[in-house]
Each structure stands twice: as structure tokens, then as C-alpha cells.
Amino acid sequence: MEFEPTKLDQDLKRALRREVPSADFAARVLAQAAALEKKVLAERTMIVLPVWRKPAAWAIAAGITLAAIIPAGVSEYRKSEERKAMQAGRQLALALNITRVQLQKTRERLQKASKQHAL
Amino acid sequence: MFLSGTCILLLPSPVITIVTVDFPSLLTDNQAMVFSLALRFLRNREVAEELAQDVFLQLYQNLGRIESPAHGTWWLRRTVCHRSIDEVRKRKLRPSLGLESVPEPSVDSGMGDFFLSERLKRMVEALPEKAKAVVLLRYQEDLDPLEIAEVLDMPITTVKSHLHRSLTILRGRMKKQEVACGV
């Protein structure tokens, strides 16, 4: 039996007829498409979430707060140290003043004693 | 609605035609085509259904770019061919036929026709991927060589060459089998 191109063509067309997938194939694809749509919608909703529900917003807020607190703390510490230095300075001045008065009194007593001794 | 896309076609005449691409209709009209092409390449119904499902979901994600139902069919045919060829290369499938791929013989066809069809199917499945794609698009999808060239992104001369060589191979193998069987 000779296989003429036309006969082979016909046989191939018959052999390669389309086959149908399982009965629930379309339903499964539609369900998956719906799930995909839901996921996309959820992702879009995430974008319009309020600021306080986004972790990134919390991280940025924490960064800004730290950036504000640290220099303020440093400045406050410096002022406190300056206050302590001023107080120490005042105490030293007072002590020196007391010493000066005591020395003055001692010198006066010595001068008085030497005058009496000379007479 | 989420399962459809709308496209406005501006024709040369002052008429504006609105074409609605409906995903469920595209799915219903093309499921057999997509599944059959995948099945011929992958030779496994489950794997073929999985790939066909992926292709339809890919279409769903690109529905906005589909201009008409005919464009949708063309897009599906092209995508399933390329995806199937990639899948076969990835899996390095050898020409073998699982029992699950053999359909039950139909009541009205004779047993001789059934066995001849099965032999031919097996021979087509054993062809190299590109040649197989050309033969499937020619005989399963009834496309002409120019359409096949567009779907597979290959020059028309290559399509004709694949077709000619594949038919010569198939004819030779059929003859060889007949001689071996003493027909």
C-alpha cells in the first residue's frame, strides 16, 4: 500500500485531532484566575493602608525620633556639666574670699602685736 | 467585570468598534486547542493540564493587551507552543508514550484506523521539538505555513523545510512498519 501525500495528510489530521481536558478544567482555571484577582486587589489595598499600619512608617518615625532625641540629650548633658563647673567656681571663689579675710585678720593682729612690742 | 477586557479598535472608516475580550469565552473556546498541543509535547495528561492552566493564567494577566478573540487564540497558540518546547527541553523528555495518553477507541472508527492513528501519533511525538510543532500546527490546528511561521517565529522556508522533512520521515517509517508487519 503506497502512502500518497494526500492519504498521509488525511491520516495525520485524523490522528492529531484535538483532545479535551478533564471536565473541571475550565472551572479550575476560572477559580485560579479569581484567586489571582483577589491577590492583586489585596496588594493594591496594601498600598493605600493608613500610615500607622505600615512597618516602614514605624521605622522612619523611630529614626526621626532618635535623630531629635540624641542631639537634645547631648546638649542637655553639656549644659549640666557647665552648671556644675560654675557652681564649683563659685565655691572656690568663696573659699578664697574666706581665706583672704582670715589672712587679713591675722596680719592685723601681727601688726598690732609688733607695735606693742616696739613701745 | 474582572474577567474581561475592553479594547477600542479605530478602523480606517469613521466607525469605532468596541471589542470586548471575555476571558471565560476565550477559555471555553480554546481549552481543547491549548491542552492538545501541550499533551502532544508532554505526553502526560496531568502535566499537560498543568501547563495549559499556566498558559491561561498568563493570558488572564495579559488580557489588557488582547485586541480580539482571534488575537487571543493566536496568543494562546503561540504561548503554548513556546512554553511546551521549553518544558520538554527542561524535562528532557524522551519519545515514549504512557498508557494514560492513549485515548479509548471511538465506537464508530474501525480498529485499523485506531491503530494507524496511534502509530502516527507516536511517530509525530518522536519528532524533534520544532519539527513536531510545525506538524502539529499544520495538521491539528490546520494552519498554513505562513501562519505557522508567525506563531513559531521562524522563516517560512524553515517551516516548509521542517514540514517536508517530517512528512518524508513519517512516510518512510510507515512503510518500514508495514514491511515489518508483512502488509
Image (cartoon, helix red, strand yellow):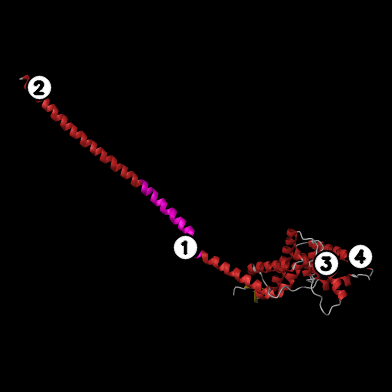
Question: Same chain for marks 2 and 3?
Answer: no
Q: Residue furthest top?
A: A118
- Foreground of the two, B48 or A64: B48
Q: Amino acid at mark 2?
A: Ser
Q: Amino acid at mark 1?
A: Arg
Distance Cα–Cα, label 3 vs label 4: 15 Å
Distance Cα–Cα, label 3 vs label 1: 59 Å
Q: Amino acid at mark 3?
A: Arg
Quarter holding the N terminus of chain A is bottom right
Instruction: Tell me the number on the disc at residue A114.
Output: 2
Categorize mark 4 by other alpha carbons within 10 Å: few (<14), some (14-19), many (20+).
few
Residue assigned mark 1 = A53
Rendering coords of residue A42 (x, y %): 54, 67
Task: Say if residue B175 shows up in the picture.
Answer: yes
Question: Same chain for marks 1 and 2?
Answer: yes
Quadrant in which residue B155 is drawn: bottom right
Task: Say if residue B13 shows up in the picture.
Answer: no
Distance Cα–Cα, label 4 vs label 2: 151 Å
Residue stretch in magenta: A47-74
Side of A97 where A5 appears, left or right: right
Quadrant in which residue A40 is drawn: bottom right
Residue assigned mark 4 = B176
Quarter holding the C terminus of chain A is top left
Residue assigned mark 3 = B122
